[in-house]
Image (cartoon, rainbow, N blue to C red):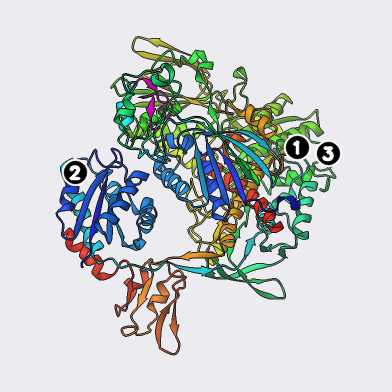
Amino acid sequence: MGPRIGVYVCHCGVNIAATVDVEAVTRFAQGLPSVAIARDYTYMCSDPGQALIKEDIEKFGLTKVVVASCSPMMHEPTFRGTIQEAGLNPYCLEMANIREQCSWVHGEKDKATRKAIQLVAAAVGKAFLLEPLEERRADVTPAALVIGGGIAGMQAALDIAKAGFLVYLVEKEPRLGGHLAQLGKTFPNLESVTPLLSKAIEEVEGHPNIDLLTSAEVVGVEGYIGNFKVKVTDRTTRRELKVGTIVVATGYDLFDAQLKPEYGYGVYEKVITGLEFERLVSSSGPGEGEILVKGKEPQDVVFIQCVGSRDKSVGQEYCSRICCMYTAKQAFLVKEMLPQARVTVLYMDVRAYGKGFEEFYDQVRGEGVIYRRGNPSEIYKKGERLVIRAEDTLLGEPIQLEADLVVLATGITPRRDSLKIANLLKLPRSADGFFMEAHPKLRPVDTVMNGVYLAGCCQGPKDIPDTVAQAKAAAASAMAPLCQGQVKVEAVTSIIDEELCSGCGICAEVCVYDALSLHERKGVMTINEVLCKGCGACAVACPSKAIKLSHFTPTQILAQVDALV
Amino acid sequence: MEPRRKGLKPAALVIGGGIAGMQASLDIANAGFLVYLIEREPSIGGHMAQLDKTFPTLDCSSCILTPKMVDVARHPNIQLISYAEVVGVDGGIGHFKVRVKQKPRYVDVDRCTGCGLCVEACRLKGRITSEFDVGVSKRGAAYIPFPQAVPLKATIDPERCVFITRGVCGKIPACKEACAAEAIDFEQKEEMTELEVRAIIVATGFDLFDAHLKPEFGYGLYPNVITGLQFERLSSASGPTRGKITLNGQEPKKVVFIQCVGSRDKSVGVEYCSRVCCMYTAKQAHLVKEKIPDAEVTVLYIDVRAFGKGFEEFYDRVRGEGVVYRRGNPAEIYKKGERLIVMVEDTLLGESVQLEADLVVLATGITPRGDAENLADLLRLPSSSDGFFQEAHPKLRPVDTEREGVYLAGCCQGPKDIPDAVAQAKAAASSAIITLRNCMEVI
């Protein structure tokens, strides 16, 4: 008996039905060979829509299903699940994308309908030849690696460890704490960082499930979700760790203020960065908690925001998200420690968006800190003092401010070594240079690399609570495979015909997943089906046509082409 | 952990089925634990289901949300309890006892196929303000809030249904007559159940600021003054206007967006920033330009807070498309003929200006839910001065609460955008998973 195909055409409300004559498409499908039943429905993905498919599988003994609806990116997993529940192999499904590739991009109903008909014909052509594939599972090593021992890495490690799994926490520096260790007080609650951080460090160091490797670096990563092999070195030793999942928490660098030469950073001693200010006022810092510039208390302090943020001239278009508030806090501290001092903040927009931030910004202005809207054009020296030239955009006039101390609110940039980590883990980066999450809205801590998750500022600027939340989120993602003990492995993989393979290795060169290797004895290439993502690059590159991709075999694709032309 | 927790089913409760509650449920369920997800409305999805496109990538909101809703409904470890409310919580971490009130839908969900025949038949069809469309459309007393609702089941509004309120609706209620599945059941009663759970995640979301509280903007008085959420429904392809931005059939040619309506405004008791309005306004301004290219679009702002990934770049793009940003908060809106006049001081020019508009969109802010205090009492949770639930520590414990075993996800803790709400939900799930796994070890 040949295949019995069911075709389901979705209206997607009006998304498809307003532009495509879905009934005509259904009638056409009903007339195709091997099509046992064709139906249309408002929302195929809804519960009743799926129930329709399941009933038909039983009633008509369907062996293959075609759904003509949205992109398979959207609902392929849904419909695979549907037919699986009705007893079919999930790979006996083919989707025709008549929304993104048809109704959404075409206006004329006649032509759009004709195109939808062709797309459905192609899908049916392929469905005819679809073969069941086996979904496989791989065991998971019940341990995780966290790269980076700042607050993000520490939090992620703690959560995974508390859930009962072994965690290797690798930190480049000799001690934990990252940038947080350099800060004095937090905004907006003005809590001292030191006791908070010491407690967290103690917890990490004392946790029996955390194996802490300081002064150490990750130099090699092999494997895949569930079974990563990670090489770590410190000065003397080299270790190989086996882990199931990886959390990247490598943090950020600060913008180099010397790239804005007009502010004279590095030229004038009295121009410092925000982080230097933190050390200046810290009780453990050089001034032992007193603000002294060349031994004297400054009378006029000017803060400049957005240094290396929102500034295309230095290639930093994005906002660094924390500078408005750390500046407000620092301005407050100056007022608290030197009540007589005149404090001015030069800003573009004040972005006080977090819990209690606006209230704090209000409080700071109430303390007498003056906010003036405008970005300075230049800072120069006049005797012992500095002069800041700016345009006050509210008054609409140029101003000159004198100061004994200028603090530059330098922004957050990707780490200079982020490319190295990106290459090690095959992580894509977004246009701003930070690591890219799998989806900007719904998958903010996952990456396109299964088993690798992001925490903290390596994904983009964020403040402490957002970093902690994201770190815990990454921990939740990293824990799931460890809890399950097994992971699903992609069933669509490349298949090598050993008769045809000459072992030239061209396929291995194009494979970004390191899934191909030469079988020493046989002299042909072999594929690691767990590593293979089914991208098909090797199949295209193979000069001997020895590689085909399951679910996308030449005969299946040619059948689609035949139906189209 | 105390040994008396032995033998309990390892389960967690998630209160609220918006994007935060859904994400938290999925993460806990994926870690192998049972989750009871309680949603008070007939469908999960929350506010995100009402949105048109998301900023800054302009992804279609329901297109990315509905697969997740389906995931929640299908997950073998998630028990979805919709149209229900938590009415009592006893016990503590590891051994909470939660009383849940299942409100009667007057529809047998096992029989209902979601076909919508009752919705069509209802005598009040088109006469009741649709909550989902924020008043932009009308529904009947028998209704399905939106086509992709999960579960896709009809609900009969007990406050409006004439059969329930007056005891008569023709000879046989029209819905009952229309239902081929015989699912309409006016005998249904409220049911109480008790759940035993080890951890609780609160993901009850937010309300929007009531724009009537700024009478100077004329919301409710002038039909062409609408809120941002109403704009979303107008602009949505699955909304009542099929995505055409029209008012009484007319395309607006002059559109003014007003930011910080009920945010950063002590005069109405809302001092904080709502964190999402700058960007949703930028997105909406873009959508107007996209759909009505010759429209004049002006955004009135105090500070533009484009702080997230890709936000500043998007703000730049929107200005590049010709949207005019003017710094200033309007004093008043009044009517002049068919049009509206927005009076505002442009603080950059330092002068008063009057802007004509055929459509004014108010970027209303995020407020704590009206029933937040009730829930705070039930769970014995502290709230911060802004009325949102208070986290255990503002810096290092953003999702934990003072009450052990109770965690916060999403906007019930304070305004946040979708990725921050998702991250926080996953964070709350992490805390809950730790609790669940540690309770397990005792068994």
Looking at the image, do the residues carrying marks 1 and 3 touch, with CB atoms under 8 Å apart? no
Residue shown at 30% from the left, 51% from the top: A55
Residue A212 visible in image: yes
The disc at residue A190 is 1
Mark 3 or mark 2: whose residue is earlier in sequence: 2
**Do pointers 2 and 1 mark residues of a single chain?**
yes
Residue shown at 77% from the left, 47% from the top: A196
Mark 2 or mark 1: whose residue is earlier in sequence: 2
- Residue B360 position, x and y percent, is 42, 21
Which quadrant holds residue A333? top right
Classify mark 2: helix, strand or loop.
helix
Q: Nearer the viewer, mark 1 or mark 3?
A: 1
The magenta region covers: B126-145
Residue flagged by tag 2: what amino acid is it? Glu
The disc at residue A296 is 3
How far separated are the C-alphas under marks 2 and 1?
A: 65 Å
For the residue carrying disc 2, how many other residues have a C-alpha within 10 Å: few (<14), some (14-19), or many (20+)?
some
Would residue A447 be found to the left or right of residue B243 on screen?
right
Work out whether A502 lies above or below A300.
below
Instruction: State the residue position of label 2.
Output: A23
Q: Which of marks 3 and 2 is in front?
A: 2
Residue flagged by tag 1: what amino acid is it? Leu
Looking at the image, do the residues carrying marks 2 and 1 touch, with CB atoms under 8 Å apart? no
The disc at residue A406 is none
Would residue A539 be found to the left or right of residue A452 on screen?
left
Work out whether B92 lies above or below B384.
below
- Residue A95 position, x and y percent, is 29, 55
For the residue carrying disc 3, how many other residues have a C-alpha within 10 Å: few (<14), some (14-19), or many (20+)?
few
Residue flagged by tag 3: what amino acid is it? Lys
Magenta highlight: main SS: loop
- Residue A101 position, x and y percent, is 28, 49
Q: Mark 1 lies on which chain?
A: A
